[in-house]
Image (cartoon, rainbow, N blue to C red):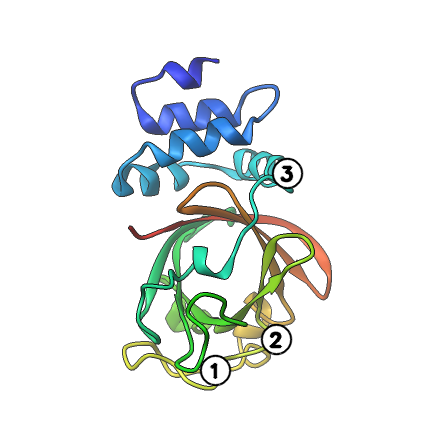
Amino acid sequence: MAGNHDSDPTRAFLGLLREAVVKPIEVARVLDDMSHAERVTAVRSAGRAEQRRLYEAVAGFRELRMTDMVGPSVAAMKPVRHYGKNTLPAFSHFEKRFCRPADADANAPAQLWGYNEGSMRWLTGPGYFVLRPDAERGELLVDYNQVPPAHPPEWPEIRRNEVGLSRLVYGFMIDRLRGVSQHVTIGSAARKGKDLGSWFVLCRES
């Protein structure tokens, strides 16, 4: 298991994802031992094959809670950044930014609000969504069919995802998120219930 003994955090992470059998507990330990900057670099190094294998490997591994995305100590409507990498051929670095609604229970919010920040937002739109739990599977759903009724003042204007170019990128999408480590999640994109063979990995800011 060369990845476990590699002094370079990114190489160690990728090495684990390329082993014959991906072991989620080892992946989580390596990620948890990194600094925030190292984690962002590592997750953004993962390509399509690595992300697909990681998504499949962590099914049922770690229950993902709403508080993993926005901690209970974070003030309501305060943005929390998750640094991401998707498997699109270009402009693959992005962020998902989340906040907890003002009237939500900090320890068990029914939903979180968010949008996508990236270099192509001017063209594709902000991709607003509502995050909600799939408690039965211990996963979270990024629902682009819903948009928040409000947003933090520094966020862009809310737009629905069924109009303009947003329709092609975010329209009719519900993505599924799985837990990897304390800060890292992995998602799979789906449109109208059909998996698109596209993944993305996120790293929450410390």
Q: Amino acid at mark 3?
A: Glu
Q: Residues within 10 Å of mark 1 (few under 14, many from 20)?
A: some
Q: Mark 1 or mark 3: which comes first in sequence?
A: 3
Distance, label 1 to label 2, CA atoms, is 11 Å
Look at the picture and state if 183 lies above or below 116.
above
Q: Position of residue 28 (x, y in %)?
A: 45, 34
Residue 108 vs residue 5, the one in the foreground: 108
Residue 47 vs residue 4, the one in the foreground: 4
Taking the spot 44% from the left edge, 13% from the top edge, the residue there is: 2
Q: Position of residue 77 (x, y in %)?
A: 34, 76
Distance, label 1 to label 3, CA atoms, is 32 Å
Q: Amino acid at mark 2?
A: Asn
Residue 56 badge: 3
Look at the picture and state if 74 lies above or below 185.
below
| Residue 132, quarter of picture | bottom right
CB atoms of marks 1 and 2 within 8 Å = no
Give the number of marks: 3
- Is label 1 or label 3 in front? 3
Residue 45 vs residue 130, the one in the foreground: 130
Taking the spot 55% from the left edge, 20% from the top edge, the residue there is: 19
Instruction: Label 1: state its secondary structure.
Output: loop
Instruction: Label 3: state its secondary structure.
Output: helix
Q: Mark 3 or mark 2: which comes first in sequence?
A: 3
Residue 145 badge: 2
- Is label 1 or label 2 in front? 2
Distance, label 3 to label 2, CA atoms, is 25 Å
Residue 150 badge: none
Q: Position of residue 13 (x, y in %)?
A: 42, 28
Q: Amino acid at mark 1?
A: Arg
Q: Mark 1 or mark 2: which comes first in sequence?
A: 2
Q: Which residue is denoted by mark 1 in the rendering?
A: 159
Instruction: Label 2: state its secondary structure.
Output: loop
